[in-house]
Image (cartoon, grey):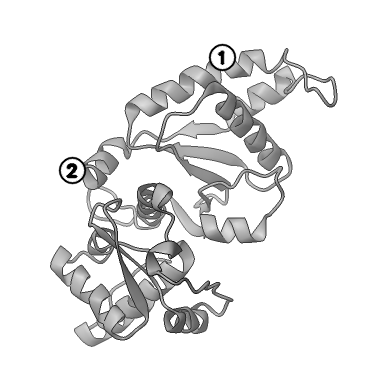
Amino acid sequence: MQYQPGANNNLTGKIRREFTMMLVARFGLVCPSNLAWLYGIKYRMALAHLNKLVDEELLTLVTTHRSLDGRVYVLSYSGAKFAEELLNIAVYFRSKEHPALQVNQNTLMHDLIMQFVMLKGIHNQKASGQPNPLWDAIVTEPEFKRRFTSTDIRNVDGIVREIDGTISAIEMEHSFKTKAARQTILLKWHYGISHGYYDKVMLFSPSQQIFSDIKRLHEALFEEMTTRRDKKTGQSLLTQQEAESLKSKIIYRTLLCNELTERFYR
């Protein structure tokens, strides 16, 4: 999923057309702002690009106040079939009476930010402009949910393969959560790591305050969970060794906080 423009305008247009379709198929939606950034074009050009795909009946426009652009684009039935040909995998499409029902309004902004973060990691650059990717392969949240259905596994926001081969779950922390919710999440991360689904968890957020709250709750829980008993087994929720191991495998990536705030909450 690394975008590279073509040698001429015609080839670049073909590449963008196909890349956009694969992007929407894998993430479930896209917005003009994310495409304008990815393709390095003006917003109006990204809008025209997406509206052309609507005219071709490959995408469907969904207007919503939950998006920073007031709109997102989702697959049409024809678009799903086209994306299947491009990806050579099954693309799930559920026909809805109204296109807006294809989008989860409650998680829409979270999903768009997560899309940006996953693509940002692939297209990351040094200050000099030299490519410096953080990871080279991704599994999106919809793909993860379809593949792993056990309730023991947390539906993480994505999986990435870092350049050194490490498989990392990534989570977008978009809201404050209760201490009880944090405990459940920690236990499911522990399950995911100990059963080999991923090696570590990287947290991203547009808010330093949310990060501070997470760290505060985690510090308290790592201490409490070693003495708190599981009602079913009678054993502690985590041993001291498990708690230390899990703590070391949760990475707080604060680097993008300011950029995410400026881009999505301007």
Q: Position of residue 170 (x, y in %)?
A: 50, 44
Residue 155 x/y as whole percent:
59, 47
Measure how far apart labels 1 and 2 are at the Cα level. Answer: 34 Å
Q: Which residue is mark 1?
A: 220
Front residue of 66 and 136 = 66
Q: Considering depth in this image, is 75 or 21 the residue closer to the camera?
A: 75
Who's the residue at 80% across and 22% down the image? 231
Amino acid bearing label 2: Arg
Q: Nearer the viewer, residue 67 or 44?
A: 67
Residue 18 location, quadrant: bottom left
> Residue at left 56%, top 61%?
143
The x, y position of residue 160, in whole percent, is 52, 52
| Quadrant housing residue 10 | bottom left
Look at the image and tell me whether residue 41 can be seen.
yes
Q: Earlier in the sequence, mark 1 or mark 2?
A: 1
As drawn, which residue projects farthest toward the front? 97
Name the residue type under label 1: Ala
Could you say whether the residue bearing mark 1 is in a helix, strand or loop?
helix
In the picture, the quarter occupied by the C terminus is: top left
Q: Which residue is mark 2?
A: 266
For the point 42% across and 48% down, which residue is it?
A: 107
